[in-house]
Image (cartoon, helix red, strand yellow):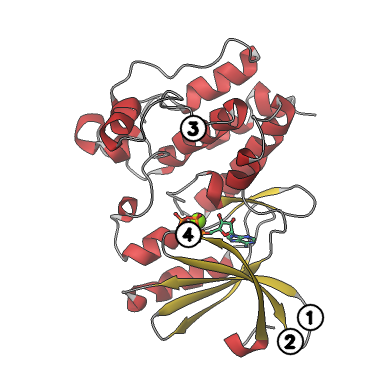
Amino acid sequence: PVETLNDLEKLTVLGRGTGGTVYKTRHRRTKTLYALKLLRSNDLNATAVETDILKRIESSFIVKCYAVFVNSSYLCYVMELMEKGSLHEALLARQGFPEPVISSLAYRVLQGLRYLQEMRIVHGDIKPSNLLINEKGEVKIADFGASRIVAGGDDYGSSGTCAYMSPERVDPEKWGFGKVGFAGDVWSLGVVVLECYLGRYPLTKPGDKPDWAALICAICCNEEVEIPASCSPEFRDFVGKCLEKDWRKRVTVEELLLHSFVINRL
Ligand code: ATP
Ligand code: MG
């Protein structure tokens, strides 16, 4: 139904990211609400294929993208509105989530990742600000491929933070290149799930300065990630398997969907 940008009336700003701004908008005729993301892009030609993929994606675990426009030097994504914002904001408002909440979140993200894998898509940027929550409290994956679109190549790790990146992406020479890269999304999910439990970014110590080198060391060199003693054995096992540094030994999305931590969710 959205044919041009003029069909939409801007209401408020929902958020700002590294590359752009997201607005809450309303379709002038149908009154339907949409989120509109405007992304400054210096390589608009590289986007045609990605745009097609984006529009083909049809899953209740992934934020729907209805249309993509190119407007002067901006890429404009018309998306499903996720009323409750991102997991990043939800985490700022709390001290962490109880395990049943994390379990259903993990289940939904895994379903989304399985769908993307069937489409041969590596998300590449799973992190709290890219997991959005709707009115019903359901979590969906957003922003997949967006960073690749922006960079216009396969160096899609260059934009944004490396905090959620897997060892093989941070330091491919040491860990060996991930063949397809699906394992990287599993690592990121592990970081997110642990962050949900702790209520803070888990790979560095609470007092640590947000120092780039320390972060890279925490991802690639530190022996093992500390998982708090208070959690259930299922949770510990789930996170431990996601945060396996060697991507060849890391658990797969299919395996995680059968893990007791998600199977036994409420
Ligand atoms: P980055 O630029 O690294 O991806 P980011 O994920 O914070 O950072 P955006 O993806 O541009 O940046 O989104 C900015 C914020 O806008 C999100 O974190 C979220 O709060 C909000 N937002 C994005 N898409 C939607 C949507 N479809 N519905 C509701 N809010 C959204
Ligand atoms: Mg984002």
- Name the element at disc 3: loop
Q: In which quarter of the image is residue 40?
A: bottom left
Given the image, on which type of amino acid does mark 2 rest?
Answer: Arg
Given the image, on which type of amino acid does mark 3 rest?
Answer: Tyr
The structure residue drawn at horizontal position 38% and vertical position 60%, both measured from the top left corner, is 148
- Name the element at disc 1: loop
Quarter of the N terminus within the rendering: bottom right
Give the labeled residue for mark 1: 31
Cα distance in 3D space between marks 4 and 1: 26 Å
Marks 1 and 2: in contact by CB < 8 Å?
Answer: yes
Mark 4 CB lies closer than 8 A to ligand 1: yes
Given the image, on which type of amino acid does mark 1 rest?
Answer: Lys
The mark nearer the N terminus, 2 or 3, is: 2
Disc number placed over residue 124 in the picture, else none: none
Cα distance in 3D space between marks 4 and 2: 26 Å
Give the labeled residue for mark 4: 17
Cα distance in 3D space between marks 2 and 3: 41 Å
Cα distance in 3D space between marks 4 and 3: 18 Å
Q: In this rendering, is residue 153 above or below 200?
A: below
**In this view, the mark in front (4 or 2):** 4
Position in image of residue 175 (x %, y %): 26, 30
The mark nearer the N terminus, 1 or 3, is: 1
How many other residues sit within 10 Å of disc 2, few (<14), some (14-19) or many (≥20)?
some
Say left or right for 205 vs 197.
left
**In this view, the mark in front (1 or 3):** 3
Position in image of residue 18 (x %, y %): 42, 59
Position in image of residue 216 (x %, y %): 29, 33
Give the labeled residue for mark 2: 28
